[in-house]
Amino acid sequence: MSACVPTRPADPTRTDESSRTHPPHSPPPKPPRRFRISGADLSASGAVFLIALPLSLGIALATGAPLQAGLVAAAVGGLVAGRLGGSPLQVSGPAAGLTVVTADLIHRYGWRTTCAITVIAGLAQIGLGCLRVARTALAVSPAVVHGMLAGIGVTIAVAQLHIVLGGTPQSAVLDNLRALPAQLANADLAALLLSLLTLAVLLTWPRIPGRAGRALRRVPAALVAVACATATAAFAGISVTKVDLPSWSSHALAGMPEGPVLGLAAAVLTVTLVCSVQSLLGAVAVDKLASSKPALRPEARRSDLDRELLGQGAANIVSGTLGGLPVAGVAVRTAANVNAGGESRNSTMLHGVWVVVAALLMVPALELIPLASLAALVMAVGIQMVSLHHIRTVTRHREILVYVVTTLGVVVLGVLEGVALGIAVAVGVALHRLARTRITHSVDEAGAEGQGGTHHVRVRGQLTFLAVPRLSRVLHQVPQGARCVVELDGSFMDHAAFESLQDWQKSYVAQGGKVEVTGRAGTRIAEPASASNSCCRPWTPWRNHHCDRPQSESAAPPAGGGGYQLASGISAFQRNTAPHVRDELARLAREGQRPTQLFLTCADSRLVTSMITSSGPGDLFVVRNVGNLVPLPGAESGDDSVAAAIEYAVDVLKVQSITVCGHSGCGAMQALLNSPPEGGAQTPLKRWLRHGLPSLARMAAANQPWARLAGRAPADAVEQLCLTNVVQQLEHLRAHESVTRRLEEGSLELHGMYFHVGEAQAYLLTEQPDEVFDQVEPEGELHRA
């Protein structure tokens, strides 16, 4: 398969022989299918192999399985899961997350039964993949998943510490902890020194500074650490236990499962759960990682989770049948594959081929590796599974209890029991948050209670029917005729709570009181729409178009035409919106406008700037024109309105940022593509569109990077020009003297924005020179890998 090289679509203004042969909208002729391996895939497979080889042996050692089982799982994960899986760039093999599960199974049932359990778990994964329930696994709380991995990491680290000290680990974590003091007292000095050498190289190798460090870091730290320990043991003549790979002729394969049915069923469920969740989460993670690689083909940047589950199931069937460890997606190898430039599933499969070659031809070299070095390597992996980043994340989301309970449950009870306990706690926490609502009542110092002070009723948490009695009791403590502010600090309000609040508000206002309902941090919120206007939620003051009338009436304009719509809209504003904004507008009238940003966008009627930026009166200084164009200073236009607005906003209003916002389906960009305004009769529209010619030239320039939309190529030439135009107009902005001065002072920022009208999705331009427009998530953060 050839390397994926981004190419530009044909110039829409150009016709040639190929365009006459094939219609412009017909699919291109399919090239003859040839199997080719790109150089990028070849080099990436080598990098992954160098990481996979020592880790596979180390994980097999940690489980107590035959060491060949790790090599079998690595080869099968690369060849089978790499070929059949739905995530082309994910590398599968024996995973550290399965170490504790597999070690427990071997201890209970023996190696042959463990292989049979792996086969049955693979069949279960194929069944789940056929039922297309892969995305359901992603519904598990991240705190549970991270807690499970942390618990497994602690278990691995404690067990491998015994091998590092020259001893033998016990089957349970608590037994290992109790035996640790005695093991420390009788530590094998040679094994400890080799382990410390391995850990030292692991820590220092990625931190070598300078140009030499960048070159050396291309060799994986795990391989260098194990090689250093092996070379030291060989040249110094240190006598320690080393890798022992028996003949492949005596390799144990899967046998018939033997043991209690319930125990075997629980074991299959555990292996299926851990393998599936880890692989699916890895596939989602690699999609985010691959989105930052614009050269990758679209099919390599998006995973098919159901197919990935089928591929992992097939790999586990083959691995278990051949006497290998359970297989799952491995984050370390996957990241190495993407970062090394892997372009397709060929790199994953080739790494499996190299593992097979090493298992057959490199046995003498592998048997020189000290077991203590492999144990130190796996112990480091286990420690890294307790991620401080994950701990900070779950703490910020107030799920640290779920994380801690899951971790302790896995360490003390086991993986399946710990996960079940974590899920139970997560459900309990969710129910507690739903039912726990704090409602308080206070009065401003401007007046004593009942004597004209503003009363504040604050609701913290979700407002459900369970809190209605307390809400009603607190609301009726507010004296008649006063001003009351109800602050709702939550993300959910059910029907019972809504009706209770609305009934009290109507009754209180009817008796002469004033009520203001606000959201978090005191921001005013609109009244909920009535049932007839439900299609307009949550912009309930926006009731002046078809959703305010029955569908049959909205199909055709009323007899009054535009005048009727104008008068109807003004009337709706005076009736519904003005009462909510009157106080704020009065304040702005007294203080004057103090906008924080200049927002320059297109005159298209579908762009509602206040809606897509969640802004209100006084927030934005808006300039709209056809095509959101910024003429260069001194350009022959006969219209200085845009330059005047920029100068006024920057020098007089002292705005802190300027945003240029383009949008999908822009008619100005379509006109530029269809008939560039060069020569011929120059109408006012064509004279204005001449300011967009630099954008057209930028899109056609071979030395300019093309703008991309959330990691994907634009849908067509019009969308590409819309994106490029935003980038070009930002360049025009920098040419204005007032903007240049403020940029040099560091007191002004420029932003590019793109709004997809049909998807109601906003994108922000990332740092240059990538020219990537990234999606803005509902939480307000840019979606980056």
Image (cartoon, rainbow, N blue to C red):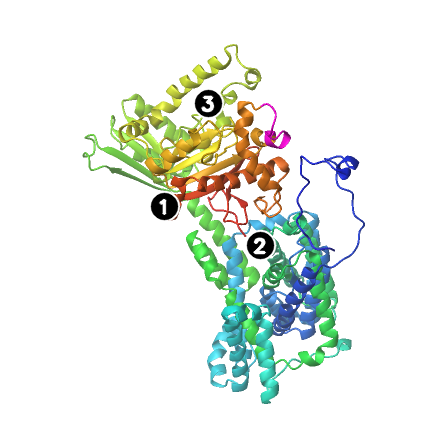
Residue 747's tag is 1
Mark before the other along the chain sequence, 1 or 3: 3
Marking on residue 225: none
Which residue sits at x=48%, y=29%?
Answer: 637
Q: Which callout, 2 or 1, points at the residue further toward the start of the chain?
A: 2
Q: Which residue is mark 2?
A: 289
Give, as a three-letter code, the residue at label 2. Leu
> Which stretch is magenta?
671-681
Number of the front mark, 3 or 2: 2
Residue with the mark numbered 3: 543
Placement of 784 over or under 386, stated as above or below: above
Indicate the quadrant containing the N terminus: top left, top right, bottom left or bottom right.
bottom right
Residue 377, visible in the rendered structure:
yes
Q: Is 736 or 201 nearer to us in this picture?
A: 736
User: What amino acid is labelled 1 in the image?
Assistant: Ser
Q: Position of residue 749 (x, y in %)?
A: 41, 44
Q: Position of residue 547 (x, y in %)?
A: 51, 22
* 676 in magenta: yes
Q: Is residue 373 above or below residue 220?
A: below
Element under disc 2: helix
